[in-house]
Amino acid sequence: MVKITFAPANRHIQVRVGETILRAASRARIAISQRCGGKGACTMCKVRVTPGSFVSPPQEKEKRMIGEEHLACGMRLACQARVQGEAQVELAESRLASVVRTQLEKQRQERGEW
Ligand code: FES
């Protein structure tokens, strides 16, 4: 068993080596959006793996789906990346949370709170 840390909640869980990030998150009831059932087809499960984390290298399917540019930034498909050692995974902000945060920031600026 190895430890994965999920940011921004800073939640630590123990996972089996070889388990996908998506499966590990699901067991720990950490929500990662997905639509294809973990088949690497929807790209909704994108997460950012922090440098120095031990996960499997991307296979051709993942490279094709996510693109070299995103891979270079540490983005991975949670359903394809397998844990090989300690890792830190940053979850993407949901679209709704992003819209709400942006609106709140805009309102604060308009009220002169910043
Ligand atoms: S769950 Fe669809 S690409 Fe990962």
Image: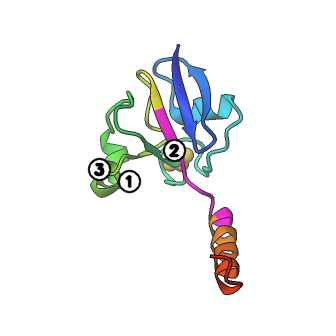
Q: Label 3: how many residues lie within 10 Å, few (<14), some (14-19) or many (20+)?
A: few
Q: Label 1: how many residues lie within 10 Å, few (<14), some (14-19) or many (20+)?
A: some
For the residues labelled 3 and 2, the Cα–Cα distance comes to 15 Å
Label 1 CB-ligand 1 distance < 8 A: no
Residue 49 vs 109, above or below: the answer is: above
- Name the residue at 36% across, 30% down: 56
Residue 39 vs 99, above or below: the answer is: above
Q: What is the number of the mark on residue 66?
A: 1
Three-letter code for the amino acid on which mark 2 is drawn: Glu
Q: Is residue 5 magenta?
A: no
Which contiguous range is marked in magenta?
88-97
Q: Quadrant of the C terminus?
A: bottom right
Q: Which residue is mark 2?
A: 90
Q: Secondary structure at mark 3?
A: helix
- Name the residue at 49% across, 53% down: 43
Q: Nearer the viewer, residue 97 or 10?
A: 10
Three-letter code for the amino acid on which mark 1 is drawn: Ile
Q: Nearer the viewer, residue 73 or 20?
A: 73
Q: Secondary structure at mark 1?
A: helix
Q: Upstream in the sequence, badge 2 or badge 1?
A: 1
For the residues labelled 1 and 3, the Cα–Cα distance comes to 10 Å
Q: Which residue is mark 3?
A: 72
Q: Is residue 78 left or right of residue 75?
A: right
Give the quarter of the image for residue 59: top left
Q: Secondary structure at mark 2?
A: strand
Q: Nearer the viewer, residue 15 or 111?
A: 111
Q: Is residue 58 left or right of residue 92?
A: left
Q: What is the number of the mark on residue 11?
A: none
Residue 49 picture location, percent across and down: 43, 40
Residue 82 picture location, percent across and down: 44, 29
Q: Nearer the viewer, mark 2 or mark 1?
A: 2
Residue 42 picture location, percent across and down: 52, 54
